[in-house]
Amino acid sequence: MSLSFISNAQPIETEPTDLSLEHSVHPGWDKQAYSLRSMGITLRPATPGSDSYQEVYFPVPAAVALDDIVLKFKARYLMDEAGALLQLLVDGQPVMIRSFSDKEGSVEVAIPLELQSSNSGFVRLGINWFSNHDLQACQVTPASLSTLSISDETGISYRYRTALPFSLKSAWGALPPDPLLLVGDEQSSAAAFDAAWRIATVLERAGKRVKVGQFPKIGDVIDTKGIRIPDAMRQTSVFDAIRRAQSGFEIGTEADIGALILLDAQAATGNIVIIDESLRRKMGSALDALAEALAPDVAATAAMDAWRERSALTGGEALNADLWVEISGSRPIIAVRAQAGPQAAGLLSDTWRQILTSSRVRVEAASRPDFTNENQIRLSSLGASFRSFQVSNQGHWTSEFALGAVSPNGQMPTRFALDLAIAPDSSGTSPVVSVLLNDTLLTAAQLRADGEKQRISARIPGYALRLSNELRVEVQRLPVASGCAQSVRGYPVSVLPTSYLEIGKAEPDGTFIGLLPSLASSPDLIVPDTWAGQGNARIMQIARLAVATGLSATHTKLVSVPEGKPVQPQTAFIAMNVPVEGVESKVGVTQSGKIAVAKRGVTWLDITGLDGITAIEVAESGGHRGLIWQSHGESLDTPSPAYVLDRGDVTLIGPQGPVAWIDSAHPDSSRIADAANSAFYEWRHYLSWGVPLISAIVLFFVVLLALAYKAGRRREKK
């Protein structure tokens, strides 16, 4: 809520001067900019061909007035003799077409966009890189080798109105690339700590680079760069001190903290804030101190009191809501009730975020839907698009899905069945269809080109799965045999909505990949009870590990145990700096910085002096599998980039992510991979009931023979 006016609060002899903060401190517009770099996206170099088209989605506040939208595109190109053509599209509409003939060069353009608002919450940038040379039918390789390398500085900038009411969906779209998640301090509740790691995980999965901050306290140095202080307010000592500090202001009193809240300093209000009673009291106390400093000015005090009463964040009556939007000056803030952490995390996930068209909600439950129907999941339930695509020589169709979306109750995908319809072409030959999962070839076959439905299926080996999976169907048409005079012409191919995935029981193989389905279900996250008081760094360590393992931000149970006390897991688990009973750890990390890696009495590594190293390994205790996470002493370091645990069973993590991978699992433990080499694998379902049935029949005949033999002996005696 914006403060409509406030008077000069310095006790001077002149009459107080009214000042409109709504237009001076908080001007009603906020600026935002996104680039590929800030979103952590790297686009592959584009070459002319069937797969040269690339798309990027830049977030904007949904259904909010936008202004000064500028698309900045920057790239370098290398050209062959044929030359090339660059086409840029925004939301499907061309905004630039340019031809290039130089052997090399750069392109840098800033294109104003005539976009008033976006209902989807995204601006979609399409990039097409064409060759100027016509491809002949017999040419399988690209006719042009021209390459376009897109800079990570490519992005958009815009400003948006903040005076209008914001929905939660719009407020999410207004978040910067590196939002500040604000929590209380060391005295914050355990519920606030639990909610914070869940919300941080959701933000990281959405491509944000989260910063976790504690509410400011006396002695903290706050970056005040960009804070606007109107001239009339500079006469007040508390505001003038902030102005004179320029970029680094050391907090000296609680009134200083209240002034930072009033001036909409990000460090004092955050972009997303976890609200518990402790934080509400601290904010209220800071604003009380500011009100006392402004007390000589009655009008200013009254205006400030009215402003505070309109906000549940700054002292007003607590809302009957779990998730709501606060307008703090020039930007919206998403507030989360600490006790509603799991529900809020589920509601802010990709599954439900688009329905948040109001500014406040109460939520009893919000989790990922179970799309399974008799152990089958339609690809349409996972967001797959089934539009036809044109294939001249080569073409492809892709669908992406998260492992957590297809791993209900710890199960995992075991087989896919894809239905295709392929139009005939002039060659009259059967095209080759290849199916890949995460660039692993699963199967390939020649299918009829008659426009009729055909099915291609194959088993999904565990080693092909990842946290984020791409299913890719490639179609290769054979060239026409009669010369090369014919120009290329595309014919349609469709992957049909009846395509589906089969899921089955997970078969852990002792590796990180084999453990992922269990962690996507309802595992325990076990941490020392001292972590809640260590705040920011611990929250980010948990969030980064949750992203790396696909840990459910909704269903995971946080378990705090006394530091140093061994635990006996009761389900799938992640133990962070907690000893686990019955586990002979392969990695040892001590407070002195010693790291030892050993198995079955053989030492693979024994070194002292390393700094900032964390070890993660797969372990089993009491029949339950999980991860053991060990940090170097009391290290609070968090790897700066996100990472993924996608191979081996032991890894060492450094400041920039994984630095070493070890696969210590016995080859025979990889049951999924080894089963693929067995001639009886496809018969396993029949053998599972066939062997007992045959055994029963054999036993029945043995009993009959025994009875017949016994009856014969009796007749002989008679």
Image (spheres, rainbow, N blue to C red):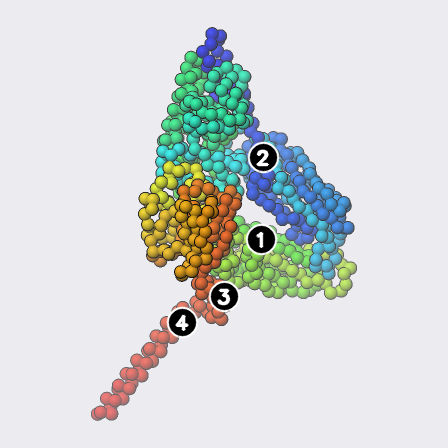
Across and down, in percent, residue 362 comes to 40, 37
Amino acid on which disc 1 is placed: Thr
Across and down, in percent, residue 128 comes to 67, 46
Q: Is residue 93 left or right of residue 342?
A: right
- The residues bearing labels 1 and 3 have C-alpha atoms spaced at a distance of 25 Å
Across and down, in percent, residue 182 comes to 44, 34
Q: What residue does disc 3 label? A: 676
Amino acid on which disc 4 is placed: Gly
Q: Residues within 10 Å of mark 2 (few under 14, many from 20)?
A: some
Q: What residue does disc 2 label? A: 33
Q: Quadrant of residue 117?
A: top right
Q: Is residue 239 left or right of residue 422?
A: left
Residue at x 41% of width, y 56% of height: 586
- The residues bearing labels 4 and 3 have C-alpha atoms spaced at a distance of 20 Å
- The residues bearing labels 4 and 1 have C-alpha atoms spaced at a distance of 39 Å
Contact? badges 4 and 1 (CB < 8 Å):
no
